[in-house]
Image (cartoon, rainbow, N blue to C red):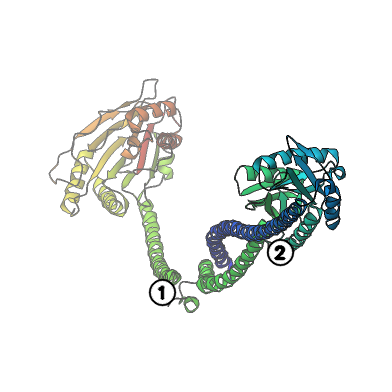
């Protein structure tokens, strides 16, 4: 069984299902990927900002705690220094001037880390006892600040720096009843060392917190100074200088996001600042970490699509097998048609899916109906062929009978010393209605006849047979051709229920006198082909007398013409004169006369065959429209005699 067509359709169906799935799935996958990218970017932004917010709040809290501790240390030191200066001032106010230096030395000894200097506040502020312990630059600064304290008239505190860059806290307390101002110096090294320790402690806490933050995969968080761009917290992968600059520019432009191109690829960077502190927090995520989840999702989707495709293939294969499998049986039945014997019951009906209600069932039932119709058609064709063969056999028999009715050239006519005669008939069908005849009615008189029965085929042949039989019976001892025509007409008209008719030309040739007498019943007159060089011409044109077989009392007339040696008479039917052309028109009398002129020197047999060929060539392959019959008679003795 040939299943190629079914397999082809099955393949097309599977491909069609795959195409639908692909067209349906690819936009969905692209849409899902797009949404996933959008969601991922939004999630990334939200996570980064949430992380930065948490880090900012934590760092700000540590910074506030550090500031508070530093401020507490400074304030505590300031209060202690002011209290010490006020106690010293109260103590020194009871010391005589000459003992001030010793008293100051004693007090300074009690506060070894806090030098004490007295300034005389008379007309001008002048350094006094204790000034020798201060370096000149620092002493000059303290003198200027002492003048301000004198002007204020109350204790004052100020931070000063010596030439080595060491910071000090200076507390100025004026004496109430004496022109003196005491200055107690306290180096801030101890306070700053403690504050630095506090800062380091907080920095370690901040770093531990940032390291413990849950950051987007492969993300890094950095804390840098907003002016110096120095690191407060960094990751294993430090920021490039250009990246630090772009982060600084983003903060200065009030942006919270910037894309940073680096040697390792693009970075998504989210930035924020710590309120009240000169610090920038930057969270960076590489582009690969953003796109990698998308590709993983695409891989999962492709795997899911492949699974769906495999499932669809199995479903499509089963569906195609169920739907198009029977097509193989139908194709096998169609291919068996050329070898099927339709004269017997159909052998493929049981294998066809005749009970299906879909298109394949309709096709199978149509195939069965076509087989039954072919059986019926073949049976009719066989019967018609048998009938046709019987008809052809009968027609062939009728043709042979009709040919037997037409005379053959016997030696007494063919070899007659006085004349030459030739005749031929070419029926348009197997049998025709044209006739010719020739026979001697006496030793010196030859009767010739040529006719054309109306219609064609068997009816015309039967009517022609009647006419020939009447001619043979009535022409013996004829008085004239016209008398014979009248007798034939009466007999045919009396027994003609189909109203058929025949055109006839009957002639009597006297071989001694060369006189030719003829009579016409609706038939054209013969054409004279002179033995001399005179042109061919028609004798009298068409007969005005009525055709035979229509009216019993029709009258006919005789015409006489003497043949000179070499003269010939050419009789014809309308199968010659009315031979059609493919371009329109008929062979006509012009063609007959021209043909006779070209063939006048030929023997009459060749002349008749030549005229038939000229008429056929004129038709240019058109089928013969009517019976073509010719009869030619020539008097011997001329230059063209045979």
Task: Give the residue drawn at x 25%, y 42%.
Answer: 503
Compare marks 2 and 1 and give the one earlier in the sequence. 2
**Residue corresponding to mark 1:** 357
Q: Is residue 316 above or below residue 567?
A: below
In this rendering, does residue 114 appear at all?
Answer: yes
In this rendering, does residue 236 appear at all?
Answer: no
Could you tell me residue 381's position as x and y percent?
A: 40, 65
Q: Secondary structure at mark 1?
A: loop
Marks 2, 1: nearer the viewer: 2
Residue farthest along the bottom direction in this orientation: 350
Asked whether, in this view, residue 69 is left or right of residue 187, the answer is left
Task: Give the residue drawn at x 18%, y 55%.
Answer: 497
**Residue corresponding to mark 2:** 209
Of residues 91 and 61, the one nearer the viewer is 91
Q: Which mark is residue 484?
A: none
Q: Quadrant of residue 142?
A: top right
Q: Are marks 2 and 1 in contact (CB under 8 Å)?
A: no
Could you tell me residue 451's position as x and y percent?
A: 29, 43
Q: Is residue 7 above or below residue 544?
A: below
Residue farthest along the left direction in this orientation: 553
Query: What is the count of numbered marks?
Result: 2
Of residues 625 and 483, the one nearer the viewer is 625
Asked whether, in this view, residue 237 is left or right of residue 485, the answer is right
Could you tell me residue 61's position as x and y percent?
A: 65, 60
Q: Secondary structure at mark 2?
A: helix
Task: Give the residue drawn at x 71%, y 58%.
Answer: 76
Pointer 2: residues within 10 angstroms few (<14), some, or many (20+)?
Answer: few
């Amino acid at each position: 069984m040939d299943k190629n067509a079914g397999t082809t359709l099955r393949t097309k169906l599977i491909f069609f299902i795959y195409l639908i799935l692909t067209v349906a799935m690819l936009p969905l996958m692209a849409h899902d990927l797009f949404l996933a990218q959008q969601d991922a970017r939004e999630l990334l932004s939200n996570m980064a900002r949430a992380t930065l917010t948490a880090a900012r709040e934590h760092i700000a809290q540590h910074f506030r705690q550090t500031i508070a501790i530093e401020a507490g240390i400074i304030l505590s030191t300031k209060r202690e220094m002011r209290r010490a200066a006020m106690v010293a001032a109260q103590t020194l106010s009871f010391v005589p001037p000459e003992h001030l230096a010793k008293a100051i030395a004693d007090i300074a000894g009690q506060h070894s880390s806090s030098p004490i200097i007295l300034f005389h506040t008379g007309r001008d502020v002048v350094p006094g006892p204790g000034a020798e312990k201060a370096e000149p630059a620092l002493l000059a600064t303290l003198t200027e600040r002492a003048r301000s304290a004198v002007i204020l008239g109350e204790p004052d505190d100020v931070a000063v720096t010596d030439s080595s860059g060491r910071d000090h806290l200076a507390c100025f307390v004026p004496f109430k009843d004496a022109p003196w101002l005491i200055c107690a110096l306290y180096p801030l090294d101890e306070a700053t060392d403690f504050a630095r320790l506090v800062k380091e402690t907080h920095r370690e806490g901040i770093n531990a917190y940032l390291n413990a933050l849950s950051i987007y995969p492969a993300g890094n968080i950095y804390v840098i100074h907003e002016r110096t761009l120095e690191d407060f917290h960094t990751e294993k992968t430090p920021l490039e200088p250009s990246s630090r600059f772009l982060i600084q520019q983003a903060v200065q432009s009030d942006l919270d996001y910037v894309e940073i191109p680096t040697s390792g690829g693009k970075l998504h960077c989210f930035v924020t600042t710590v309120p009240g502190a000169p610090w920038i927090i930057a969270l960076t995520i590489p582009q690969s970490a953003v796109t990698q989840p998308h590709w993983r999702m695409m891989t999962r989707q492709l795997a899911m699509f492949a699974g769906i495709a495999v499932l669809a293939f199995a479903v499509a294969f089963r569906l195609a097998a169920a739907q198009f499998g029977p097509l193989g049986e139908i194709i096998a039945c169609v291919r068996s048609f050329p070898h099927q014997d339709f004269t017997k019951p159909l052998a493929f009906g049981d294998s066809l899916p005749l009970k299906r209600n879909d298109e394949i069932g309709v096709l199978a039932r149509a195939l069965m109906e076509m087989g039954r119709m072919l059986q019926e058609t073949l049976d009719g064709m066989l019967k018609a062929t048998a009938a046709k063969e019987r008809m052809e056999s009968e027609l062939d028999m009728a043709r042979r009978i009709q040919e037997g009715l037409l005379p053959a050239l016997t030696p007494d006519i063919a070899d007659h010393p006085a004349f030459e005669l030739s005749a031929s008939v070419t029926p348009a069908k197997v049998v025709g209605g044209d006739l010719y005849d020739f026979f001697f009615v006496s030793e010196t008189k030859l009767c010739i006849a040529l006719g054309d029965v109306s219609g064609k085929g068997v009816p015309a042949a039967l009517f022609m047979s009647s006419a020939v039989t009447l001619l043979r019976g009535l022409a013996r001892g004829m008085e004239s051709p016209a008398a014979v025509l009248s007798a034939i007409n009466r007999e045919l008209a009396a027994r003609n229920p189909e109203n058929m008719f025949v055109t006839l030309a009957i002639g009597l040739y006297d071989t001694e006198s060369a006189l030719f007498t003829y009579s016409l019943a609706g038939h054209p007159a013969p054409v004279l082909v002179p033995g001399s060089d005179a042109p061919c011409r028609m004798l009298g044109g068409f007969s005005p007398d009525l055709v035979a077989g229509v009216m019993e009392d029709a009258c006919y007339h005789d015409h006489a013409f003497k043949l000179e040696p070499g003269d010939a008479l050419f009789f014809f039917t309308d199968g010659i004169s009315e031979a059609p052309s493919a371009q329109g028109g008929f062979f006509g009398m012009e063609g007959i006369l021209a043909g006779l002129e070209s063939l006048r020197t030929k023997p009459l047999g060749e002349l008749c065959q030549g005229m038939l060929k000229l008429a056929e060539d004129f038709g240019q392959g058109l089928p013969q429209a009517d019976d073509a019959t010719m009869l030619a008679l020539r008097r011997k003795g001329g230059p063209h005699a045979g």
